[in-house]
Amino acid sequence: MNRSKLSTTPRKKPWVLTFFGLLAASDLLAMPFFVGAPDAAKMPDMVRFLGHFHPVFLHLPIGVFALIILQELWLMVRKKGGASDDASLYPLFFGAISAGVAAILGFLLYHGEAEFSKSELVEQHLWAGLFFAVAAVLTLLAKLWTVAMQWNPIFYRLLLFVSVGIMGFASHEGASITHGKNYLTEYAPESIQKWMAPQANAEDKKSAQSVSASTVVPSDPVVYSDIVAPILERRCLQCHKESKFKGKFRMDTYELLVKGGKSGSGLEPGNSAESNIIIRMDLPLDDEEHMPPEGKPDIEDSEVAIVKWWIDNGADPKKKLSQTPVPPAIQEAINKLTAAVSPAKTVLPPAIIETDKNLLAAVSNISKEFPGTLTFESQQSQWLTFTAVSLRANFDDAGFKKLAPVLSQLVSLDLSATKITDQSVAQLSVAKNLRLIRLSETSITDISIDTLVQLSTLESINLYGTYVTDVGVSKLSLLPHLKKLYLWKTSVTPDAIKLLREKLPACEIVTGIEA
């Protein structure tokens, strides 16, 4: 029997296949509601094992339906939109089954992996896959009835095109999970990018603005959120965020950064040498495992040093810079980082402009002399913060004298690693609002302590690497609000520290030695 006779021979009505097909389609749609919210912790390993076969099966229906759509387009051209034949029945049957299997495996993967269940993009991909599987079944049933009843194929072809459209959307979402939302349009002309991926482009722009904003380091930054996280955002988040997490590794939150991905935990607090992110960063550039990968801007040595230092000091997500011992090399790396993003011009709160023209003029003059060092605490505050991190050895007693007009307004003062002496600290007797001061790695001595104890508002003092002794430090017990004191790498003895702790029980004293 030839093809033409076969296509015109009456067929038995496919009631049984229709019943089971509709049952399967309804079960696929009901499955998420029946199972409920994902909870990877309660899933057995078998769920994860089967779910990992999803990438193997998902390509089968894609290939089959691509072939069928080409075949139907050819028939439409050859027969000028006329009747379809039954040549696509078996491919459709195989395509519908493989689509259903792929959707079920994807569902298991979604419920078995915590990273996937928390991603909105993955959830969209899951539903798109389920709708495609249902559309594939309905397309098969439409084809069966079209052949059996010798109907016009227009309804079947309409379902076929709808199925392929849903398949394309699901495939795009899947590619976005693996490669990022702009994977297909990354190198396309701008007009095509705007048409195909306006949302992805807007998100990338928003992300870039967010990173830029987050790199402005405050006077006493939180080491993780204000220094380390912006480094990771610039160098790593393009491939390790919610919309795209290679190696199942997300770095957009502290918890996920520590948890890591399929290669294990992301970092080991206290041990940078065993932390995966550092191991990958330290690999040779030509190593395929080196991160960031080839084609992406490589992380600078100073940035790697900062991340290593943070990890080796416990990788605490909440500690501020003033609470952590900062070696000279790391301070220099932080200086380099902050100098690159420090504003060249101070933005003044409207309240200051209206109420104190003398202060405005003083701040303006100092900002011109030392760009990016003097800022207001907030847009609603008249209090000032000064940091010499970008000046270091270029800032001395002569430079400090220029701060005289604003000393009474200072609440935070960072003079770490500068050339100032006791002579400069003596001028701080008028800084009655000062809450934080960093004098680490300067040449100050016990003479400066006599000035500091006059500032009853002080809450944090960093004397790391200075020449203070037991005699001077013992006087700090007179400060009623002192909460943090850094005495690492000084000549202060354990006995003096023990006595100071007894007098200041609410003060955390960081020494780097056993008291």
Image: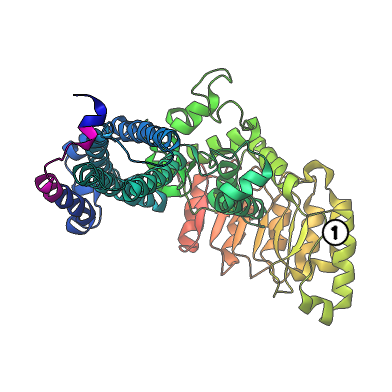
**In screen coordinates, is 18 left or right of 123?**
left
Give the image location of residue 90, x and y in percent.
23, 32
**Region of the chain picked out in magenta, as a range:** 6-20
Residue 55's place in the image compared with 205, above or below, is above
Q: Residue at x 65, y 42 (%)?
A: 465
The answer to if 29 sits in the magenta stretch is no
The colour style of the image is: rainbow
Q: Residue at x 84, y 55 (%)?
A: 400
- Please tell me which residue lies in front, 234 or 274: 234
Give the image location of residue 227, x and y in percent.
60, 47
Give the image location of residue 345, x and y in percent.
82, 58
The answer to if 10 sits in the magenta stretch is yes
Which residue is the extreme one toward the bottom? 355
Q: Residue at x 69, y 51 (%)?
A: 439
Where is residue 467, by image quadrant? top right
State the SS at label 1: helix
- Please tell me which residue lies in front, 353 or 115: 115
- Residue 486 can be seen, yes or no: no
**In screen coordinates, is 199 left or right of 380?**
left
Q: Which residue, given by chain and number where applicable, does mark 1 sit on?
A: 367
The amino acid type found where label 1 is placed reads: Ser
- Residue 350 can be seen, yes or no: yes
- Please tell me which residue lies in front, 71 or 194: 71
Q: Residue at x 16, y 41 (%)?
A: 44
Residue 251's place in the image compared with 54, above or below, is below
Quarter of the image where the N terminus is located: top left
Main SS of the magenta segment?
Answer: helix
**In screen coordinates, is 470 left or right of 417?**
left
Give the image location of residue 191, x and y in percent.
67, 46
Q: Callout 1 environment at 10 Å: few (<14), some (14 to 19), or many (20+)? A: some
